[in-house]
Amino acid sequence: MRLAILADMHGNLPALEAVLADAEEQDVDGIVVLPDGDPVALELYGKAGLLDLAYSRVELGATLAEVDEAVLICGHSHIAWHQEWDGRIVLNPGSVGFALIR
């Protein structure tokens, strides 16, 4: 299964539209949204028909102690990163508005 994971849009509609177009071109199976919490972003995600997931700011180690999942996805830093932590994968997709150059 291929997922597009979106985070930290902060009302940047052109960036959201570009990412959604790319997700469609990449033929992803689904889209996961890590919402920003700001009203403009939530409204735009809603208008795009995307699902908002609840989130909170907590320390990574404390969060991993409470979940059994093999993968944890988080946002907020606007910087894409991934790492292995205690045998599990933890990743941040970065910001919708900041391109990741490969």
Image: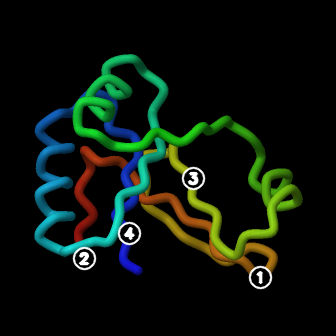
- In this rendering, the answer to whether 19 lies above or below 26 is above
Front label number (1 vs 4): 4
Of pointers 4 and 3, the one earlier in the residue sequence = 4
Q: Work out which quarter of the rendered image holds the N terminus and state it.
A: bottom left
Q: Distance between the residues labelled 2 and 3?
A: 21 Å
**Disc 1: which residue:** 87
Helix, strand or loop at label 1? It is loop
Helix, strand or loop at label 3? It is loop
Of pointers 1 and 4, the one earlier in the residue sequence = 4
Residue appearing at x 12%, y 51% in the figure: 18
- In this rendering, the answer to whether 92 lies above or below 77 is below
Q: Distance between the residues labelled 1 and 2?
A: 26 Å
Question: For mark 1, does the 10 Å Cα neighbourhood hold few (<14), some (14 to 19), or many (20 or more) residues?
Answer: few
Amino acid type of the residue that numbered disc 3 sits on in the rendered structure: Cys
**Disc 2: which residue:** 102
**Disc 4: which residue:** 3
Residue 36 place in picture, x, y as percent: 45, 33
Q: How far apart are marks 4 and 2 (CA)?
A: 18 Å
Residue 29 place in picture, x, y as percent: 32, 71
Residue 92 place in picture, x, y as percent: 50, 59
Q: Which mark is residue 74?
A: 3
